[in-house]
Image (cartoon, grey):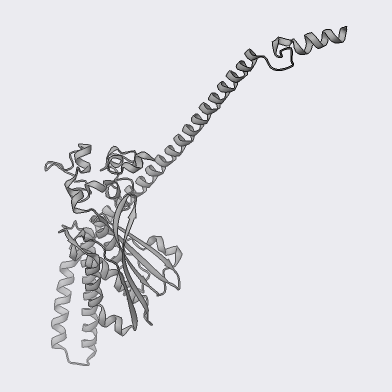
Amino acid sequence: MDVEMHDSDGIHGVDGMYDDGGMLGGETLESLKAIAVRQAEEIKRLTQESAAYKKGVEDQMSINEGLRFSRERLIDCEKLAALGRFTADVAHEIRNPLTAVGGFARRLMKMLGVGSREKYYADIIVAEVSRLEKILRDVLTYSRDTRLKFEDIKISEIIQESIAGFEDIIADHKITVVRALDDTPPVSIDHAHIRQVVDNLISNAVDSMPDGGTLTVSTANEKMHETNYAALRIKDTGMGIPKGKLDKIFEPFFTTKEIGVGTGLGLSISRKIMDEHSGIIRCSSVEGAGTVFSLFFVYQAPEDRLLQQCWQHMNCGRDCDSSSEKCPAYPNFGRVCWAVAGTYCEGRMQATYAQKIENCKRCKFYQTVNEKDEAK
């Protein structure tokens, strides 16, 4: 009797969980289902909150990284600007007396007898004056603001011209030239200035292979950050650059060459010219195995120039004649402003021009141009 009561009230009858057949009751089953649904919704909500929190942390880390990068670039730009002003002033002060010294030394050379010790001294003076004059020209080139004349030119044409100018030196050094020039589209550049960059890089490559080697020049179409680039690479099999010096090669007056051989301004000038072109210059090197310099030129199709540009969308006023500062994207790269003036810019610190320092993917104009990004 006691067992039956226990069996009846303690098992089958507790809170109505079981019916007479030992199965869950209908109301209880529905209640458990509702609890399960609420728990699933709560888990989903917590998962979404966790994902949102994680994204917020990642976004904040990205913003902090952008701020750090912009700060470092701004400091570098301020240093280079101050150095440029200082060197320009010094160069102007030195140029006049140096010109006088060189002029008088050349006059003396004509008056002195061949083979005399005085003639030997005068030759040294003239040679050193010529070297100093070259340094001064490089300093002034580096420090002054240049006016560029943009034209649509194929990079392969410039590389061919430059190699032709080095033919004799290349032959003397017994260097083999390998050309791998793809059909890249014309890009907006200043012919004379980009020719100077290419000449500097080829000259450095030749100097790094005094006993011969292989000089490889190649062009290709490449894409980075939803932007098309015409890429040029100049590769040598020379001595390479020590790892500890690789991050300093674009600094003014830094050189890996012997004293008296290089001015230490060739790569600095090249970097400056590429910045002015809203382009990118990179270097990779393995000591004892060679060096590769890569140049990237932004390509914007002619039909894109007829579409809405970034300054029209942003209403920033950078395209106005009264604007004291022109955005680097104006007037050639308005459809790819994030690559030349935004957070993907690898040139001078220009994110302030784009009115942002965060990831360009947050920009409404970026999303408008790259609709596929919005769908992701």
Q: Which residue is at the front of the view, 272 or 123?
A: 272
Q: Which residue is at the front of the view, 46 or 266?
A: 46
Q: Which residue is at the front of the view, 255 or 219?
A: 219
Where is 315 relative to 71, above or below? above
Q: Is residue 360 visible?
A: no
* Location of the N terminus (image quadrant): top right
Q: Residue 38: give x, y in percent of width and height.
A: 56, 21
Can you tell which quarter of the image residue 312 is in? top left
Q: Residue 175: give x, y in percent of width and height.
A: 34, 81
Q: Is residue 109 visible?
A: yes
Q: Residue 318: give x, y in percent of width and height.
A: 18, 42
Picture mark count:
0
Can you tell which quarter of the image residue 360 is in? top left
Farthest right residue in view: 1
Residue in view at x 16 percent, y 43 percent: 319
Farthest left residue in view: 321
Q: Residue 87: give x, y in percent of width and height.
A: 24, 60
* Location of the C terminus (image quadrant): top left
Side of 1 where 260 appears, left or right: left
Q: Which residue is at the front of the view, 24 or 166?
A: 24
Residue in view at x 26 percent, y 83 percent: 168
